[in-house]
Image (tube, rainbow, N blue to C red):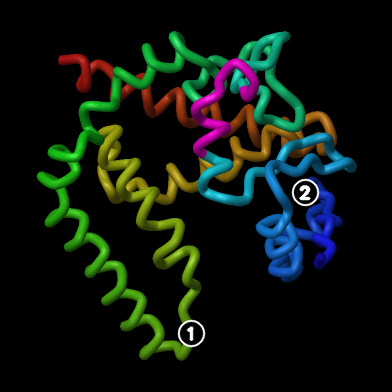
Amino acid sequence: MEELATPTTNILDPSWWQADPQASHSDLLSYPGLWQDPASGYWLAARHADVLEVERNPDVFRSRHPDGGGAYRVVHSVDEATMISHDDPEHLQQRRMVNRRFTPRAVRDHAAHYEAMVADLVDAAIDEHERTGAVEVVDALAAQLPCRVTAELIGFGQDRWREVKSWSERQMRIDRRYVEETVLEDLTNSITEWAMVMQELLPERVA
């Protein structure tokens, strides 16, 4: 009987993400069931069935840390109140604020609009490549598309997608705020910038 490969990775090691992780992915896919990374203690779900098992078993796999905040974070934030940091029923209560925009019918109603948006971005990327011989795919497509959609849904307007991208990237580094002093300062500034824009926008959205 062929011996199964044991995954040998530290998912918190930046060099692993920067390198080619295909061999580790193959080991994870061949490993029976969930695998716990001994270096970080995190459990990895590599197969679709495993992801479904985690999603459907909230008594074991929780989003809320016992001390508060998100258990999904390396360094949890005790006062975090985001939707992803909650389990039901709090998670469902927050999700109900936005889920009507993402029903199958609602998505179908907006399909043509987003198809046109994707076409415009692809055309612009092609033009950039023809003009300069290169195109930065993340900025032109991978990041720009979700940021444009998010900015539009919230009410900022697509033209402010770069602000949304900046806030998102800076706030996603929250786990490093106690390790790198500049990250904490930049995180605080990004939240302040976002809050100021929301103060202008919220009265219009409520009305």
Q: Which residue is more in the foreground, 71 or 1?
A: 1
Q: Residues within 10 Å of mark 2 (few under 14, many from 20)?
A: some
Measured in 3D between alpha carbons, the distance from the residue under mark 2 to the one under mark 1, in whole angstroms, is 32 Å
Residue type, label 2: Ile
Number of numbered tags placed on the structure image = 2
Which comes before the other along the chain, label 2 or label 1? 2
Question: Which element carries disc 1, helix, strand or loop?
Answer: loop
Residue 134: image tag: 1
Q: Identify which residue is drawn at 82% across, 38% down.
A: 180
Residue sitting nearer the eye, 200 or 123: 123
Q: Nearer the viewer, residue 122 or 46?
A: 46
Residue for point 33% across, 82% down: 126
Residue 23 image offset from top left, x and y in percent: 74, 69
Above or below, 135 relative to 173: below
Q: Which residue is mark 2?
A: 11
**Residue 40 position in % (x across, y down):** 84, 38
Q: Is residue 40 rendered magenta in the image?
A: no
Image quadrant holding the N terminus, namely bottom right
Label 2 SS: loop
Q: Nearer the viewer, mark 2 or mark 1?
A: 2
Residue at image position (22%, 32%) is 101
**Magenta stretch?**
52-61
Q: Quadrant of the C terminus?
A: top left
Pinpoint residue 132: horizontal percent, then vertical percent. Answer: 44, 88
Direction from residue 76 to residue 115 in the image, left or right: left
Query: In the figure, residue 74 lies in which quadrant?
Result: top right
171 sits to left or right of 71? left
Q: Quadrant of residue 38?
A: top right
